[in-house]
Amino acid sequence: MRVAVFGTGGVGGYFGGKLAQAGEDVIFIARGEHLGEIQKNGLRVESILGDFTVYPARATSDPVKVGPVDAVLLGVKAWQVSEAAAAMRPLLRSDTIVIPLQNGVEAPTQLSAVLGPQGILGGLCKISTLVAAPGVIRHLALEPYIAFGELDGRPNTLAYRLCEAFLRSGVRAEIPADIQAAMWEKFLFIAAFSGLSAVTRSAVGALRSQPELWSMLERAMEEIYSVARARRINLPQDVVSRTLAFVQGLPAGATPSMTRDILEGKRSELDYQNGAVVRMGLEAGIPVPVNTFVYYSLLPQELKARGELSG
């Protein structure tokens, strides 16, 4: 398959790198020093499952030079989705599939607003990665997993072909029967974990060790569950207990990307995680006090990082 990775950060770089290593035709869209290193020395992946290098790696900053592809893996940050949608038009033909891999549930809507709904799939991944240096992706934790599918559950030939390509590459991949429920299940985990981790400046071990924080984490998840049900998302009734059990199994030092961005004074995905819970809670008339506390506690720093607040 011909696949474009639009945004070769930790997520896009890892999953695109696995496809390229397996022999798929992958083009990485990146910029700056990261792009230069990939073009010169290839894309290096340092992984807990084994290091590898894609060399030579096809990489560019200009989608026009790529042309139409079978699939686009969208690996940009959540606040960059609309801008990326406009820039990726040269990659699209009538049947191209676009798979957003952001932390959140709003990317398909953002993409459809710019590009129309045709070919816009739901998507999610589970992995802990970062850009360790220009041209270098580091896989820190979790078994890599990716899932995608049509939002209404219809079959899609290219989606099945891409899923098979991921499986051949050694990545656990699937097309869930209900991709929207799958996206919300991840959202319930990542928004609650990111918010509590960021507001306390703590890794998961600290959240587990303090009963009061653990209770807040549980309540944050329950709020997201209530919002999801109000939006007719078919989350299973035991999703909170299963997610808490998953958090119990994470390495004590694990921190989500939103926490790392906030600790480094960078712009984060706050508006698309806890902020999204607050917005959707208001729309549905569902109280979300824990997520509201987290969002407004972190918002001043977020505004400073965007250059929208001084002092």
Image: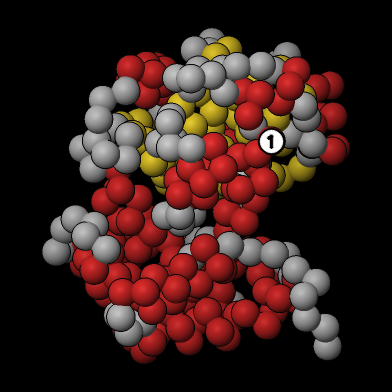
x, y percentage for residue 71? 50, 23
Q: Is residue 156 left or right of residue 310?
A: left
Q: Pointer 1: what residue?
A: 87
Is any part of residue 311 visible from this angle?
yes
Q: Residue furthest left?
A: 237
Q: Image check: 288 left or right of 42?
A: left
Hey, which quadrant is residue 32 in on the image?
top right
> Where is residue 261 shown, x and y percent of the image?
66, 63
Image x and y of residue 231, in percent: 27, 63
| Count of numbered labels shown in the rendering | 1
Label 1 crowd bin: few (<14), some (14–19), many (20+), radius 10 Å: some
User: Where does residue 50 sit, x and y in percent of width and height?
Assistant: 54, 30
Decide: is 272 above or below 13: below
Q: Is residue 249 above or below residue 150?
A: below
Q: Nearer the viewer, residue 42 or 297?
A: 297
Residue 210 falls left or right of residue 35: left
Q: Identify which residue, 144 or 277, lies in the foreground.
A: 277
Instruction: Give the side of residue 77 with respect to residue 241, left or right.
Output: right
Q: Residue at x 37, y 24 (%)?
A: 159
Give the image's coloring scheme: secondary structure
Amino acid type shown at disc 1: Ala
Q: Determine the residue positioned at 53% across, 79% down.
A: 295
Residue 253: in sight, yes or no?
Answer: no
The residue positioned 14% from the left and 64% from the top of the image is 237
- SS at badge 1: helix
